[in-house]
Image (cartoon, helix red, strand yellow):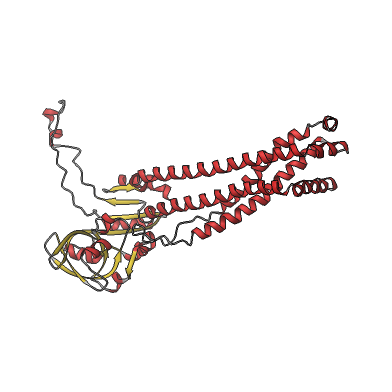
Amino acid sequence: MNSFRLILDISKTHLLSKIKQTVVAALGVTFGISTFIILMSFMTGLNDLLDGLVLNRTPHIQLYNKIEPSEIQPIDSDEEYADELTFIHSVKPKIKLERIHNALPLLSELRKNKKVLGATPQTTVKVFYLAGSNKLNGVLNGIELQEEIRLFNFKDYIVKGDANSLLKRKNSILLGSGIADKLSLDIGDKIQVMSTNGSFHDLVIGGIYQSGLAEVDDVQSFVSISMAQKIMGVGNNYISRIHVKLNDIEDAVPMAKTIESLYDVSALDIKQANAQFDTGSDIRNLISYAVSITLLIVSGFGIYNILNMFIYEKMNDIAILKATGFTGKDVMFIFISQALIIGFFGGLLGIGIGYAVSAFIDTIPFVTEALPTIKTYPINYNINFYISGVVFALVSTFLAGFLPAKKAQHIDPVEIIRGQ
């Protein structure tokens, strides 16, 4: 214990005697760690934001009727051509209803499944928005509001008005922001819609919906599912899509295949629907980690150079220590302890500065129509970044101090004293 305390006292004396070099070495660690934390917090926060914009609004599984050509053509049933090679041109898709067959029983079964967090139906209606002499093509999505809010954070995208107006008023509509701008409409105004079957319906604007995608906000609006079915003139069993959210997103692919095999419906899983987005997200994360680790490595080389020069200047002290009975290992431990002290305090200061700058960035306003739910720059306060910073500070300073300390261990005091 006494020898350990003595080694620490000698290390402290060495560090304080060259305070400028000590501060520069510690600041090298501080700069590397703080930059690592700031960069990782901001980049992963941005990635999480982009992922959330997609994943929060995208169901894990989408069920719908897919219109496609019949796999079996009439000529395939003719025995005369059974052994012949046939070519069929201009194959037309088979007649298939847009609504999902037996949607209500299917919805009930999905909601009973333990892997399913929730399932919500939608009825899609193609309409014209009418305001005076203006007429715009559009789509009305009939939804179950409470389930949409619970599963897909729907309420966050209502930038004006009240989403609950769909529950309070039967003929309420949450109008797309692009449509509202083009037709100069606001909360409380009325808008008339005409369905493809020629029926007209007056709706009251209860809220403005903004997804951040202009091509969506220019055509899409939301009403209650019962109102959408009324506009289409169909019964309450007419459901064109079912959106499913699972407890574990990894179950999406196998469960989609299972649903397709059991029911006469097409199932699109989130991996297939967002394959390009997932690839881009992985590349962004890879770049973030590569740049951050490079900064830490550069910081480690700076520490190594400083400690190497530090030991070179302390040759006389090393000779005196060895001449007074200190072993080579004691000398090595002295310089390794110096490196670890620099790494520890430099790392703590780096964490403090990294957190402070990240918190400051988190308060900077960031307002854009493309991201209506975001008010400030995104920051990820993942504790793993701070733990990684401290661990790397200690490991890098240890390695940076080990090689010079190994050199100091084998210094011959006689040669140094003779040279003096």
| 20 over 352 or under it: above or below | above
Viewer-proximal residue, 370 or 411? 411
Residue that sits furthest to the right in the current view? 324
Residue in front for this viewpoint, 56 or 311: 311
| Residue at 77 percent of width and 46 percent of height | 14
Q: Does residue 120 appear to the left or right of 93 in the view shown?
A: right
Q: Nearer the viewer, residue 10 or 143?
A: 10
The answer to whether residue 142 is visible is no
Left or right of 87: which side holds 270? right
- For the C terminus, give its image quadrant: top right
Residue 363 lies, in percent from the top left, at 48, 62
In the rendered image, residue 190, in percent from the top left (x then y), is placed at 20, 71
Can residue 394 be seen in this snapshot? yes
Quadrant location of residue 316?
Answer: top right
- Extreme residue in the front direction: 420
Q: Say above or below: 367 vs 22.
A: below
The quadrant where residue 312 appears: top right
Q: Position of residue 334 (x, y in %)?
A: 77, 42
Q: Quadrant of residue 197?
A: bottom left
Q: In the image, residue 218 lies at what x, y percent?
A: 24, 58
Q: Is residue 276 above or below residue 77?
A: below
